[in-house]
Amino acid sequence: MIVSKRIGFQTKGDCDIIDITPQVEQQVAESGITNGTVTIFVAGSTAGITTIEYEPGLLSDLRSVWDRLVPRNIHYDHDSRWGDGNGFAHVRASLLGASVTVPISDKRLTLGTWQQLILVDFDNRPRSRQLVLQIVGE
């Protein structure tokens, strides 16, 4: 069986990190799938999805690493072409990735004890984001 779901979020931009685990868990529990996988995909080219231990120190560390790896204050050709100033956000999102897949066992996500799913919005302004969930299994 395949079940598709959508979840909407309002984000603040500027490396806003949102714990999406409870919403994904709810959709998996309601899907009727007992064992399988769920793929979580963010529609948009300036946001990404991964897993992390969702605690203040690590959230700060993650934001800092993005500033070091892909700084905001350097030239991006994308900005020259479009003038929207978010070239850095596109690069960050492409490095993080737009999706993650998690196994489902007994109607539950098989995440580690300290592992949560997060949505990271890198854009330079607030956004309305849509997550697409593809739940596959039996």
Image (cartoon, rainbow, N blue to C red):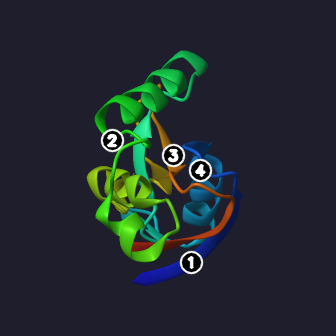
Occupied quadrant, residue 91: bottom left
Sequence-first disc among 3 and 2: 2
> Which percent across, then down, holds residue 50?
39, 47
Q: Amino acid at mark 3?
A: Ile
Q: Residue at x 32, y 50 (%)?
A: 96
Q: Residue at x 36, y 54 (%)?
A: 102
Q: Residue 131: name its quadrant.
A: bottom right
Q: Earlier in the sequence, mark 4 or mark 2?
A: 4
Q: Is residue 113 visible?
A: no
| On-image quarter of the C terminus | bottom left
Q: x, y (%) of residue 127?
A: 66, 65
Task: Say what amino acid the circle numbered 1 marks.
Answer: Lys
Amino acid type of the residue that numbered disc 4 sits on in the rendered structure: Ile
Q: Are marks 2 and 1 in contact (CB under 8 Å)?
A: no
Q: Is residue 2 above or below residue 30?
A: below
According to the picture, the residue beneath numbered tag 2 turns out to be 70
Looking at the rendered image, the disc whose residue lies closer to the viewer, 4 or 1, is: 4
Q: Upstream in the sequence, badge 3 or badge 1?
A: 1
Q: Which mark is residue 20?
A: 4
